[in-house]
């Protein structure tokens, strides 16, 4: 009887209304859980959000604070050598104000010494860009910037270069040529650019221990200094090309044009190697902050660039002698 009664027993009465109430309760619980999780996500600190924004496909493991913070101060010996080089150029320019520059040729227009000076200028332009490529990403990440800003840091000098080329053409173009003024532009514009680079190097070496917001501000100030430096250094570009055209015979222009391209490529090739050598000398087996490495790269570039500036100062003449007329090639008839 008991078994039959259990068999005949009806299942508990679960109406549709109670089932709906249960689902509504679960839905309310899910909505509350989702709102709670969103509230927790919204409470992340601002620094963590900014760090997450810096992450990319190759930089997800990197943050502004994941790099070494060891700073290598500038050695007094290196600064003394740089000061001696600058004083050497200054003394030579004082000497050249009253006499002929030491290696300049005022009797003949053609001079291979001058051609080497032009080639060194092209080498220098591309060398300084390629030198900073290996450390640019780590540098920008430590300064609180993204990988995209690393590319902007490398390419931004083109803005100042274009403006500088236009300004240089207006100041000293081929139409109203002034050889003495063009020579002064090539010497002193480079020196002003070097001073901007020196200020940039000191600022970089002292920005490692700043706060994240201060480093971000410093980064844009460095971009501004780079724009000023490249603008001024690009101003003598048109005078340099005009001067080279005046001292290069027509029969040799193709050769020196090819050599100029070779020296541009050489600058791109030697730049990363120069960084590797500088990093090895600065690190000495210990980790160094990327910002400090960037500062030392600029300081090393100043030493190298100042030597080239002294050479250019000695070979650039104050007076250009016109090129002798070359015999014209005989005309040949073409039978069709």
Image (tube, rainbow, N blue to C red):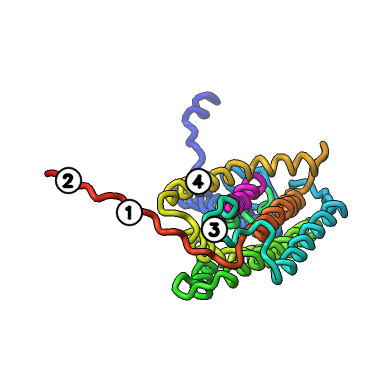
Residue drawn 51% across the image and 29% down it: 5
Q: Which mark is residue 108?
A: 3
Asked where in the image residue 272 lies, by quadrant, the reply is top right
Report the residue marked by disc 1.
Answer: 328
Residue drawn 53% across the image and 52% down it: 27
Question: Mark 2 packing: few (<14 Cα in 10 Å), some, or many (20+)?
Answer: few
Comparing 138 with 132, the one in front is 132
First in residue order: circle 2 vs circle 1: 1
Label 2 close to label 1 by CB (< 8 Å): no
First in residue order: circle 2 vs circle 4: 4
Disc 1 or disc 4, which is closer to the eye?
A: 1
Report the residue marked by disc 2.
Answer: 334
Residue drawn 54% across the image and 73% down it: 178
Left or right placement of residue 79 versus residue 21 in this view: right
Q: Can residue 227 be seen?
A: no
Label 3 close to label 4 by CB (< 8 Å): no
Disc 2 or disc 1, which is closer to the eye?
A: 1
Q: Which residues are magenta?
A: 116-137
What is the x, y in percent for residue 93?
A: 72, 66
**Residue 278 located within the stretch drawn in magenta:** no
Looking at the image, the residue that sits furthest to the left is: 336
Label 1 close to label 4 by CB (< 8 Å): no
Question: Mark 1 packing: few (<14 Cα in 10 Å), some, or many (20+)?
Answer: few
Q: What element does badge 2 sit on?
A: loop
Separation of residues labelled 2 and 4 (CA atoms)? 33 Å
**Residue 135 located within the stretch drawn in magenta:** yes
Q: What element does badge 1 sit on?
A: loop
Report the residue marked by disc 4.
Answer: 259
Separation of residues labelled 3 and 2 (CA atoms)? 38 Å
Separation of residues labelled 1 and 3 (CA atoms)? 21 Å
């Amino acid at each position: 009887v008991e078994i039959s009664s259990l068999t005949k027993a009806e299942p508990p009465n679960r109406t549709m209304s109670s089932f709906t109430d249960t689902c509504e309760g679960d839905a309310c619980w899910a909505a509350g859980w989702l709102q709670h999780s969103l509230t927790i996500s919204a409470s992340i600190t601002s620094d963590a959000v900014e760090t997450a924004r810096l992450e990319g496909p190759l930089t997800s493991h990197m943050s502004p604070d994941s790099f070494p913070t060891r700073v290598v101060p500038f050695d007094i010996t290196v600064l003394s050598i740089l000061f001696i080089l600058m004083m050497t150029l200054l003394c030579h320019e004082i000497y050249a104000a009253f006499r002929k520059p030491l290696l300049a040729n005022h009797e003949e227009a053609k001079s291979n010494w001058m051609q080497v000076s032009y080639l060194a200028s092209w080498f220098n332009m591309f060398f300084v860009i390629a030198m900073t490529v290996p450390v640019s990403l780590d540098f920008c990440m430590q300064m609180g910037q993204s990988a995209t800003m690393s590319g902007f840091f490398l390419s931004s000098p083109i803005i100042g270069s274009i403006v500088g080329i236009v300004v240089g053409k207006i100041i000293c173009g081929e139409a109203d040529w002034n050889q003495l003024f063009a020579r002064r532009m090539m010497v002193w514009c480079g020196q002003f650019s070097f001073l901007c680079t020196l200020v940039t190097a000191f600022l970089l070496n002292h920005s490692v221990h700043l706060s994240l917001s201060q480093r971000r501000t410093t980064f844009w100030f460095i971009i501004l200094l780079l724009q000023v430096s490249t603008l001024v250094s690009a101003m003598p570009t048109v005078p340099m090309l005009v001067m080279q055209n005046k001292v290069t015979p027509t029969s040799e222009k193709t050769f020196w044009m090819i050599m100029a391209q070779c020296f541009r490529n050489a600058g791109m090739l030697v730049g990363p190697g120069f960084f590797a050598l500088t990093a090895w000398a600065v690190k000495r087996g210990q980790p160094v902050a990327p910002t400090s490495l960037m500062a030392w790269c600029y300081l090393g570039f100043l030493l190298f660039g100042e030597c080239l500036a002294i050479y250019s100062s000695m070979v650039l003449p104050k007076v250009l002698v016109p090129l002798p007329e070359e015999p014209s090639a005989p005309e040949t008839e073409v039978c069709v």
